[in-house]
Amino acid sequence: MKQSQALRVMMSGKSVFLTGAPGSGKTYVLNQFIQAAKKAKKRVAVTASTGIAATHIGGTTIHSWSGLGIRDEISERDEKWLKDNDRLLKRYNNVDVLIIDEVSMIHGKRLDMVNQVCKWLRESDEPFGGIQVILTGDLFQLPPISRGDTKIDFVHLSNAWKELKPEICYLSEQHRQENDPLLDLLESMRSNDINQAHFDALSERLGLEVPQGEAITKLYSHNQDVESINDSHLRAIEDETKTYVMETYGVQSKVDSLIKSVLAPEVLELKVGAEVMFVANNFSEGFVNGSRGKVVAFRDGMPLVELQRNRRILKVEQHSWALEEDGRERARVSQLPLRLAWAITIHKSQGMSLDSAEIDLSRAFTPGMGYVALSRVRSLGGVYLKGINNTALAMHPEIFSFDEQLKQASDELASQTAEEAYVQADEPQAATSSTRQLDESLLEVLKTWRAQEGSKRRVPLYMIAGNKTIEALATNQPTTISQLKSVTGIGPKMIENYGEELLGLVREHLGVVSVPDEKEQKIQEFLTQKNVELSAEEITQLRRILDS
């Protein structure tokens, strides 16, 4: 599918999974959609699975936006305290489009949780409470690590994904440097078609020394290797060591669970010159989970870190992570949101884009690990390979078959999109009630009105008007009482309460000052014949008198 076709599908209001190989332009299309959606007055929530990915699209993490944080589960008893959170309630009911980038790195269970909270807070049984959902990512990336469970929690196997049934937009064009052996290798890995030439290309990068003085990210498969390398680098610095010990509060079992969930170490040792990575999000301070930097000094016992991205120097203070249940804090840990980062795990590198990297795949232990590590680097010339094993270039077999399904679904959708574009361009249709399309901008107007009315009356949104009724209004665009009566979902009570107000919104949106209905038109014709002149307002008043 071409980028323009994908954008057209996304702008139609349908929920979409946007995917494609590295270099196909997923981020570009996503940014184009965000701009277009906001221009169309849609309220867009931009999120991603990780802090690094969120910065690429100017958003926040889905964990933060959803209000769920690091919790692993929710139950029906959580519904009340979530609804009592006015900030969350407003957030969920003032969004039309929810974007989740790098969705492959989200547990399927977490997507189910977000889906459920959307339904609760929007009081709707529709998938994600009726929100248009745009999922993006590459399912060949590593899925999230599941603690204590050998079963892979692929996001596309979640109940939320199956319920949403997103349209598939699989970008097929390549927009990175052509003829780069790395892109050919990655594409061959995706199609399970690796040959000797690919191994030969990698072999040429095996054992190469990193140029002297060049700072380079080291990617390793195991935490033990990462910690050993980081400790070795730290010991090599001849300077005073500063030690920071994690503070804990709450029930010990809950504290232990929380410690396992956060990436901050229980004991953190730092020196001036230490390479570090942030492990929490603080957008106001200018760092996110995954931001890289170097300790340049200490002030008042706290480290000053120079960010790698913009050379900004930050004084890093303690950060707290809390575990809540039933709206109450059960446990909390506090530590500097940092860890040493001369080396990082391949899992942690997801979402990064690097000019060069030192990669060790000699202990790769799960399919997809080599694909993730190699796809972080922009070209093969930036790969410094320390080692490789037989597992490194393998991919999850279940992803291959699903990827073929995605391509087929996307091809069918692309064909339909092309046909629709042809009809619109070469065979214009009259805008009759049967062919009239949903007016997305009018839909936004009506949703805003409904939200304001619900807030004013302190009632759920569906008691004002259901989603299907709102969509029917935005499609039929009634400007008279008689037209309003014919709209599905509009009854006498709704006309009595909101009839004139709804007609006013539609007329204003369409630029129509007033449109008389059939009876008013007949009155107008009669008065014209009798040479009697009345204003539109006076004719409407006369009509009401006659009706009474």
Image (spheres, rainbow, N blue to C red):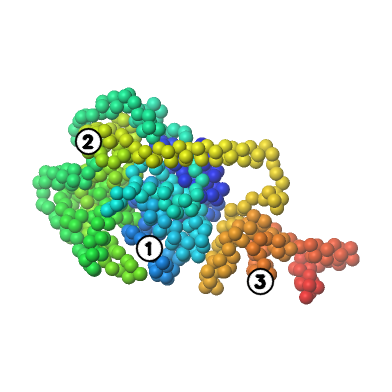
Give the residue pinned by disc 1.
74
The tag earlier along the polypeptide, 2 or 3, is 2
Q: Nearer the viewer, residue 309 or 463?
A: 463
Residue 152 in percent (x, y) is at 34, 48
Give the residue pinned by disc 3.
493
Q: Which residue is drawn at 31% across and 24% down?
A: 196
Instruction: Locate residue 46 relative to residue 363 in the image: left or right.
Output: right
Residue 101 in percent (x, y) is at 41, 48
Quadrant of the drawing holding the C terminus: bottom right
Q: Which residue lies furthest to the right in this view?
A: 530
- Three-letter code, disc 1: Ile
Give the residue pinned by disc 2.
362
Cβ atoms at labels 1 and 2 below 8 Å apart:
no
Q: Which of 358 and 433 is in front in this view?
A: 433
* Disc 1 element: loop
Instruction: Locate residue 116 relative to residue 41 in the image: left or right.
Output: left
The tag earlier along the polypeptide, 1 or 3, is 1
Q: Residues within 10 Å of mark 1 (few under 14, many from 20)?
A: some
- Three-letter code, disc 3: Lys
The tag earlier along the polypeptide, 1 or 2, is 1
Q: Residues within 10 Å of mark 3 (few under 14, many from 20)?
A: few
Q: Residue at x 27, y 57 (%)?
A: 261
**CA gap, disc 1 and disc 2:** 39 Å
